[in-house]
Amino acid sequence: MRKPKGILLILAFLLFLPPAFGNQIKTSRIRKVGVSPNFIALSPDGSTLYATSYGTNELLAVDPAKKVVTRSVKVGSSPLGLAITDMGRTAVIACKDSGTVTFVDLEAFRVTADVRVVGQPNSVAVGPRGYRAYVSAYGRSREGWLHIIDVRDRSLLGSVQMGTAPFALAVSPVTEHVFVVVGGDNEVWVVDPEKSEVVQKIAVGEAPDGIAITPDGKRAFVANSRTGDLSVIDTQLMSVLITIPIGKMPFGVAVSPDGKRVFVVNNESRNVSIIPADLSSLEIETFAVEKGPTDVEVSPDSRTVYVVNELSNSIVIADLE
């Protein structure tokens, strides 16, 4: 057991540390980003943002330097989650009401394929090798689905039945296991895509909505919207290490590419919480965003954060010192 003196020294050290972010964060806005934009993704070089415009059934390209929408293309009905693959040349989009997964050529900015799936697709993640896309979908009945799609052939490889209301998902960069947030069951289901089967179910907080995995694959962070907290999962032990209070209705989650920080969008608090990914401190820093924030992305150099705001039709850009 560590001596009390050691604990006091650590506490004293943490108390006198200067804030890592706080008032140093400068923010700016991109206005008129479609109608009810929900999800965003970045090109590999960070020069272009992509957003799904739920209200206009479009994929938008946004220039974050000029702060304007530069291109748009009609996709399926009610687009939600998206992912960028093929070295930044292709977008994969979950279109809820049309029941399709749309592929967009980002150079020509046109639709190249629509893959029909069971249920109402809502979120997309691409495996570390870029060959497979994983799409969660609400079921018409109680159960939902995880669909596995071949990115090269634009074809459905298979589907795995999920629990109630599967939503956000993330893929381990090490094992390629797919971690699916099953909101109606208050769990994260872990799927082995090679076997097309669920290998683990992990209980988290109430109404989980967002998830992100560290670049080394060792931890997953799950935002629980109803309990207002963040479950930290050890992906090797397949269990929750700690649950951290965050804000009101946390939703989207992102881990910086350098693996150092976790960003959590708090929808009702209208801010973003920042915590160290290694949990070296549980002191939470925040910065304000606009009405209805839903999703967050971090630039490749880990210095800029982008937050899309559904009810404000905007994207907030935060520059980290």
Image (spheres, grey):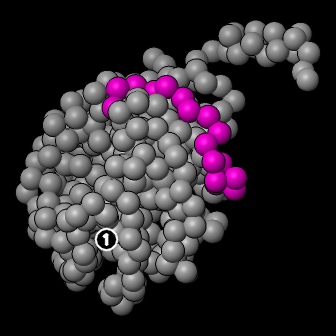
The quadrant of the image that shows the N terminus is top right
Circle 1 residues within 10 Å: few <14, some 14–19, many ≥20: many
Quarter of the rendering containing residue 155:
bottom left
| Front one among 207 and 10 | 207
Magenta stretch holds residue 211: no
- The answer to whether residue 176 shows anywhere in this view is yes
Q: State the residue at coordinates (62%, 34%).
A: 242
Q: Is residue 148 left or right of residue 173?
A: left
The single residue placed furthest to the bottom in the displayed view is 153
Q: Could you say where residue 289 lies in the image, as x and y percent from the top left?
A: 30, 29
Could you tell me which residue is drawn at 12 percent across and 50 percent down? Answer: 34
Q: Magenta part of the protein: which range?
A: 234-249
User: Taking 34 as reference, is 294 left or right?
Assistant: right
Q: Position of residue 203 (x, y in %)?
A: 52, 46
Q: Label 1 sits on what residue type? A: Val
Question: Residue extending furthest left?
Answer: 56
- Which residue lies at the image location 34% right of the left edge and 69% below the top edge? 145
Q: Is residue 46 visible?
A: no
**SS for dot 1:** strand
Q: What residue is disc 1 on?
A: 92
Residue 65 on image: x %, y %:
31, 46
Please determine whether, in this image, residue 48 is positioned above or below residue 229. below
Looking at the image, the residue that sits furthest to the front is: 142
